[in-house]
């Protein structure tokens, strides 16, 4: 492992432990040359999860993109980033555990809506209004009525 401080190619592992979600190993390392300490994470390499978009194009699943969408929906709402990161991790785990290698963007949006419904109803409505592309006030009102 290359040292981020001096660029030397050798380091020793000081401490290893699993992360909270258990899917990664956190390793504290020390550079043999300069003595600098840094952290690395080891994960299992898997086949990438592909997302099938509405236009039938395919692209790798990007958890940051999903997190950004949830952050946008929760703008100026009392929702912590930790809660949203956990929601994204849950969605990603659900998709990976299904052993399906291609998933539609609609399925991801539905999972995100379920999570937002439990987290914050205003954020849920914001997300749904963009995702479902309401064209009339009646459609929007029907969604609001379903929440009551």
Image: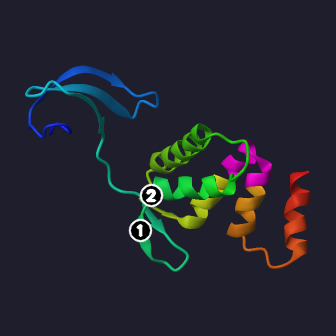
* Quadrant where the image shows the N terminus: top left
**Residue 139 image point, x, y percent:** 86, 72
The residue identified by callout 2 is 62
In the image, residue 138 above or below residue 14: below
Q: Secondary structure at mark 2?
A: loop
Residues rendered magenta in the picture: 114-123
**Residue 77 image point, x, y percent:** 73, 47
Q: Is residue 80 left or right of residue 132?
A: left
| Viewer-nearest residue: 120 or 37 | 37
The residue identified by callout 1 is 59
| Viewer-nearest residue: 123 or 145 | 123
| Viewer-nearest residue: 48 or 119 | 119
In the image, residue 146 above or below residue 18: below
Magenta span includes 116: yes
In the image, residue 97 above or below residue 108: above
> Are the residues tagged 2 and 1 within 8 Å (C-beta)?
yes
Graded by Cα atoms within 10 Å as few (under 14), some (14 to 19) or many (20 or more), the crowding at tag 2 reads few
Marker count (numbered): 2
Q: CA distance from mark 2 to mark 1?
A: 9 Å
Q: Is residue 144 left or right of residue 51?
A: right
Quadrant in the picture for residue 84: top right
Graded by Cα atoms within 10 Å as few (under 14), some (14 to 19) or many (20 or more), the crowding at tag 1 reads few
Q: Main secondary structure of the magenta part?
A: helix
Q: Nearer the viewer, mark 2 or mark 1?
A: 2
Q: Secondary structure at mark 1?
A: strand
């Amino acid at each position: 492992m290359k040292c981020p401080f001096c660029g030397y190619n050798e380091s020793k592992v000081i401490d290893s432990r699993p992360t909270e979600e258990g899917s990664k190993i956190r390793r504290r390392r020390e550079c043999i040359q300069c003595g600098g300490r840094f952290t690395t994470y080891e994960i299992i390499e898997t086949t990438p999860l592909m997302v099938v978009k509405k236009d039938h194009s395919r692209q790798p699943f990007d958890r940051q993109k999903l997190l950004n969408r949830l952050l946008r929906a929760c703008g100026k709402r009392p929702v912590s980033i930790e809660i949203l990161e956990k929601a994204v991790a849950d969605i990603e785990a659900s998709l990976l555990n299904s052993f399906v290698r291609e998933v539609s963007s609609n399925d991801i949006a539905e999972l995100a809506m379920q999570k937002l419904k439990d987290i914050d109803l205003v954020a849920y409505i914001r997300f749904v209004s963009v995702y479902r592309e309401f064209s009339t006030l009646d459609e929007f009102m029907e969604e609001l009525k379903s929440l009551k």
